[in-house]
Amino acid sequence: MGRLVPEYAGVKYWRIEREGLQTPVWDDDHPGTPYLFTETFPSGRGKFQARIEIHPADAARLKMQDGEAVRVSSRRGAIVLRAWVTERTTIGVVFVPMHFAEAAANLLTIDALDPLAKIPEYKACAVNVAPAANEELGHPERKVQRGRY
C-alpha cells in the first residue's frame, strides 16, 4: 500500500499493533501525525468547485475549453458545472464528483437501492455534455429536491 500511497509508507501491521498510528506516516521512522493543524484550521480557504472531467479529444469534438461552463444532462436530470479538460479520463467517459451541492451528480443517476444490502446502486449513467452560460453555474446555497431523500 505504501508504494501506491506515500502517506502510508510507514504503516506496518507490527507498528499499528505496538503503538497505533495516524496518517500520514511517511516512512518506517516517521512517528505518525497525531494532528495536522497546530495553530489554525484552514477553514474557508479551500477553493473547491464542482467540475466535470472530460478528455481533451471529447472537449475538442464538443468545442469546449477548460474552465467553461457546461450542462451535463441525463434522462433523470441536469446540472451545470465547469469543464476540466484532462487526460485523467478515457475518451467517451466523463467524471463528475458526487459531493458538491451546487452540481450534485446524484441528480443525474438513479436513486435505486440494492434490495439486500440497502446501499445505493453504483453511480454510472449515460449523459449528454453541452455548452452552458456562466450565469447558469450553480450556487451552493440553493437547495435542490431529489427523489425520496
Image (spheres, rainbow, N blue to C red):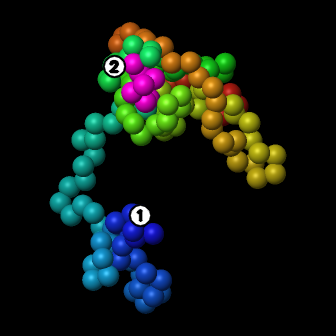
Q: Is residue 11 above or below residue 115?
A: below
Q: Quadrant of residue 137?
A: top left
The quarter of the rendered structure image containing the C terminus is top right
Residue drawn 34% across the image and 66% down it = 6
- Which residues are drawn in magenta? 54-60
Left-right relation of 133 to 42: right
Q: Nearer the viewer, residue 74 or 104?
A: 74
- Furthest-left residue in this view: 39
The secondary element bearing badge 1 is classed as loop
The quarter of the rendered structure image containing the N terminus is bottom left
The secondary element bearing badge 2 is classed as loop
- Furthest-right residue in this view: 115
Q: Is residue 121 above or below residue 58?
A: below
Q: Nearer the viewer, residue 47 or 123?
A: 123
Amino acid at circle 2:
Gln
Q: Quadrant of residue 25?
A: bottom left
Residue drawn 39% across the image and 19% down it = 60
Left-right relation of 41 to 4: left
| Residue 28 position within the rendered picture, expressed as x and y whole percent measured from the top left | 32, 82
Amino acid at circle 1:
Leu
Left-right relation of 40 to 109: left
> How many numbered discs, if any?
2
Q: Is residue 10 magenta?
A: no
Whether pointer 1 and pointer 2 mark residues with C-beta atoms closer than 8 Å, the reply is no
List the residue tagged with mark 2.
Answer: 65
Residue drawn 32% across the image and 23% down it = 67
Q: Main secondary structure of the magenta part?
A: helix
| Residue 121 position within the rendered picture, expressed as x and y whole percent measured from the top left | 70, 41
Report the disc number at residue 4: 1
Q: Quadrant of residue 138?
A: top left
Q: Nearer the viewer, residue 136 or 10?
A: 10
